Image (cartoon, rainbow, N blue to C red):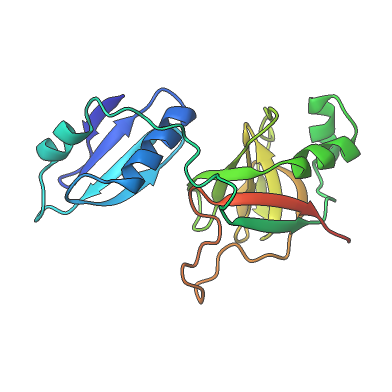
Amino acid sequence: MRVLPSGSAGLLLECDDLDEVLGLYGVLQADPPDGVVDVVPAARTVLLVLDPDATTPDQVRAAVEGLEPGSGDAGTGDGASVVEVPVVYDGDDLGDVAEVLGCDTDEVVRRHTSGLWTVAFCGFAPGFGYCTADEGEWSIPRRDSPRKKVPAGSVALAGEFSAVYPRETPGGWQLIGRTDLAVFDLDRDPPALLTPETRVRFVEAGS
């Protein structure tokens, strides 16, 4: 892990992989150093946002250097709540994903719905949660040509991640289905439904 400055009131922890990110995030979220007001995970980094009136970057650096990541499964116990996402699996790229995986489309749906997923981090757009599968391996290439418009509620795959598009945006992920579940709503507190460490189960819904 490398500890780098991020502006005047932040530190960026560079990690070797996503497992290290999740392990550090769990430890820091549970017991943040004094003066750390937010912990923001990403694919290979963890951003620590500091209160400059309460601490300094040097003090926080000293607290986190040598920190050992946890198991990365915080919030994944039997008592953790699970968000169910009902999905109609009729996405335009479902057949392409099946070809990549060497199976038929029914098997793609079975794999996608057979286990739990965990939101590793958020990004790209407000409410866009990058979910990783607890079981099985996913390695799905992005589309060669991104779409100019991906409808809100589209359920997609890219790399090792699955996600729900919270609003209509351009996008290059492979679309396998759609959901009516609002994953981002400004009238809700918090607005984002799929936040880091949230457990997710994709459930096949009727068309």
Total residue callouts:
0
The residue nearer to you, when weighing 175 against 89, is 89
The relative height of residue 107 versus residue 87 in the rendered view (above or below) is above
* Identity of the residue furthest to the front in this view: 78
Q: Is residue 16 left or right of residue 35?
A: right
Name the quadrant of the C terminus.
bottom right
Residue 141: x and y in percent read 67, 29
The residue lying at 79 percent from left, 26 percent from top is: 100
Residue 85 found in image quarter = bottom right
Q: Is residue 205 left or right of residue 74?
A: right
Name the quadrant of the N terminus.
top left
The residue lying at 63 percent from left, 57 percent from top is: 83
Residue 68: x and y in percent read 32, 27
The residue nearer to you, when weighing 93 against 202, is 202
The residue lying at 51 percent from left, 73 percent from top is: 188
The relative height of residue 31 versus residue 195 in the rendered view (above or below) is above
Residue 56: x and y in percent read 10, 44
Q: Is residue 173 left or right of residue 41?
A: right
* Identity of the residue furthest to the bottom in this view: 187
